[in-house]
Image: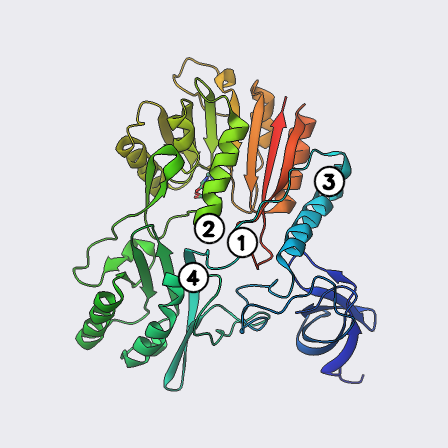
Amino acid sequence: MSKQPTEVELLVTELGEDGLGHSELNERPVWVRNALPGETVKARILKRRRGIRFADGEWLADAHPDRQPSACEYFPRCGGCSLHHLSYAAQLRHKEAGLHKQLARVGIEPDSLPWRKPVGEVRLGYRRKARLGVRALGDRVLVGFRESFSSRVAQISHCQTLTPELSRLLVPLQQLLPQLSIADAVPQIEFAQGDLDICVMLRHLKPLSDADLGLLQDFARQQRVELLLQSKGYDSLANVFNQAPPQHLTYQLQDYGLTLGFFPDQFIQVNTRMNRELVSTVMGYLHPLPGLKLLDLFCGVGNFSLPAARLGAQVYGLEFSDAAVAMAEVNAARNRLGGKARFGVADLYSTESLPNVSSQSEASSAYDALLLDPPRSGAGPHLANWLAQTKLSRIVYVSCNPATFADDAKIILDAGFSFQEVGVYDLFPQTAHVETIGVFQR
Ligand SMILES: C[S@@+](CC[C@H](N)C(=O)[O-])C[C@H]1O[C@@H](n2cnc3c(N)ncnc32)[C@H](O)[C@@H]1O
């Protein structure tokens, strides 16, 4: 059998939900980065896996009408983003089309639904949390996102999707790390940025020398960041100066007079401005809030629970992470909402029936509304049970995965709800990730 050519001319037929152009070679799929439907590209095959080829695309002819020059010089090699070559309006249309497709897959007719206009307001410089790879290469150390189609670390000296404050740390880190005695034993660095402070978490697999500690302390002083050393899991995070556990960071939701704390390893929505939009949209869907009994499932540190409580709802938030629940309770108390918002720890993937809102004697049907914001795997196996047991009238579902959103939407519709509105919410511009919001009414 002849060896596959490494460079071929291909016609791109489709843009996948992962932002890759789709084509075929000898009746086998080829996924091409930096390629749009209708374009002819020179594809350089970079990787083959289970009969699928992955290629770099160099545009040759018939540019897609929505092609735009990438704002990022590292695109498409850096795998942090996948849509820099597509105009922003077309990115939103593409994300909405992906959601259409997922809904159609489960038998929901997308054209019959009440769509809201896609929302996207910040295009670059939005990302306040990130995990970056680190790789020692001779006397240099790379710090960046993984390359697409590879586990190599991309060579970048700035990043357009990170906030400017985080992007500015890349070069100083690349200068610092080669000086450490254990430069080859630092596999990753994570950033978390609050409104006021920045944390840098440095994972290290070998003990640091005193000289290393001195260098790291200088870095923390010069860059005005909290530098946390991580020798094992997140439990081992320790301040570089005094080995103390991390301080919490904060972000404000000004519209609700709220300041929320979070620890650097905890989940927060990565896009500050779009999160504010999202919170206010969700509150709009829950309106009227005074007296509403709301169950907030997958509540994190209270990003939705506390604005709802501020507007007068009686909220019960459930969440798997006990640290997040503890933080949500602190956030409620500090914002004087302890009487309105309560929280509990629960593994919702194994919770068959919904707990009671305010007292053990009250039936679970006491909830008026349900807010769902699960991880990528969706609401879990008990969603149908929850809906069968209650007389909820409203569900607001925020999702980071259109596929599991569609599966869960089908379950919700089968339980007697109908869509009041659905749409995409772009928390991750320039990437293929998409947030979906669905509102259901019984
Ligand atoms: C997408 S985040 C949403 C958090 C919060 N609503 C926010 O806006 O910041 C999903 C949350 O689900 C939690 N989670 C993951 N698996 C879970 C499970 N099995 N049961 C309950 N919560 C879980 C995570 O800890 C995370 O806080």
Is the residue 430 above or below the residue 422 in the image? Answer: below
Sort mark 1 into few (<14), some (14-19) or many (20+) by Cα contacts within 10 Å.
many
Q: Is residue 62 left or right of residue 199?
A: right
Q: CA distance from mark 1 to mark 2?
A: 7 Å
Q: Earlier in the sequence, mark 4 or mark 3?
A: 3
> Foreground: 317 or 64?
64
Is 420 located above or below residue 269 in the figure? above
Q: Residue at x 59, y 25 (%)?
A: 387
Mark 1 lies within 8 Å of ligand 1 (Cβ measured): no
Q: Amino acid at mark 1?
A: Phe
Q: Earlier in the sequence, mark 1 or mark 2?
A: 2
Q: Is residue 110 above or below residue 288?
A: below
Left or right: residue 124 versus residue 264 is right
Residue beneath disc 3: 106
Q: Earlier in the sequence, mark 1 or mark 4?
A: 4
Tag 1 residue: 428
Mark 2 is surrounded, within 10 Å at the Cα level, by few (under 14), some (14 to 19) or many (20 or more) other residues, namely many
Cα gap from disc 4 to disc 2, whole angstroms: 15 Å
Residue 269, x across and y down, in percent? 45, 47
**Is residue 246 shown left or right of residue 156?**
left
Q: Nearer the viewer, residue 194 or 263?
A: 194
Mark 4 touching mark 3, by CB under 8 A?
Answer: no
Query: Which residue in the structure is indicated by mark 2?
Result: 271
x and y, in percent, of residue 13 in the image:
79, 64
Q: Does the residue tagged 4 have its C-beta within 8 Å of any atom of ligand 1?
A: no
Marks 1 & 3, CB-CB < 8 Å contact:
no
Q: Residue at x 51, y 74 (%)?
A: 152
- Label 2 sits on a secondary structure element that is loop
